[in-house]
Amino acid sequence: MSVRLIGLAVLSLFLAAASAFAQPNPRPRVREAAGRRHVKDDPVVNPSATTHPLPAPARPAGERVIPDEKRNDGWAAARWTTSTLQLPGNAKKTISLPAPSIVLVRASWPDDSDVTVSVARGGTTLKSVKGAKTPGVGRVTTARVKVPSAGNIVIGATAPGSSTKVTLYVGVTAAQ
């Protein structure tokens, strides 16, 4: 009988220990994630946003990438204008520069037309770039042109046989 009592005591101790360790799991902790940026801060939507990281396909071929810490504040500090150029008509925009400047150009259009955007002054083409496919946007191209003196420049878009609308963003900042 004493063996039976010892067995019952061991069994009750085992059940008490099992119930002590069988606590329900604590509630999971809720951590807040970092806040999301507003769409107005997205450079694709608003070219005057504080940062303007360009996707690799949007950079013209041969243009070197400047690391963020060495990049000047050109995109953020520029005075921006927006216009729409309708192809094949008179697809030109004249910009008057009061002093030596850096002109930043971003053009986009919704279809796959092979559009060439050029910056010219006095009949001389300072820069000419073609667009790159960008998912969800169509085609996009960018250009950075240093204009050494005051005067007018003409930004034009051409595409043989195309009748697309090109949205043109032009930023002007002081030359460095």
Image (cartoon, rainbow, N blue to C red):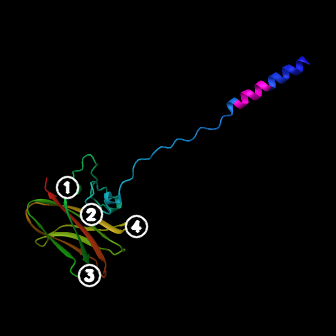
Query: How far from the left and from the top, in percent, is residue 36?
Result: 39, 53
Depth order, front residue of 103/5: 5
Q: Is residue 110 magenta?
A: no
Residue tagged 2: 142
Label 3 vs label 4: CA separation? 24 Å
Q: Choose mark 4 or mark 2, whichever is in front.
A: 4
Decide which of tag 3 and tag 4 comes sooner along the chain: 3
Identify the mark at residue 88; answer none if there is no mark: 3
Residue 77's mark? 1
Q: What range is drawn magenta here?
A: 12-19
Q: Is residue 94 left or right of residue 142?
A: left
| Residue under pointer 4 | 136
Crowding at dot 1, Cα within 10 Å, few <14 / some 14-19 / many 20+, comes out as some
Q: Give amino acid for label 3.
A: Pro
Where on the picture, by quarter, is residue 24?
top right
Label 1 with label 4: CB-CB less than 8 Å: no
Residue 158 screen position, x and y as percent:
25, 76
Badge 3 or badge 1: first in the primary sequence? 1
Q: Work out whether mark 2 precedes mark 1 in sequence or the reverse, and give the earlier one.
A: 1
Q: Secondary structure at mark 3?
A: loop
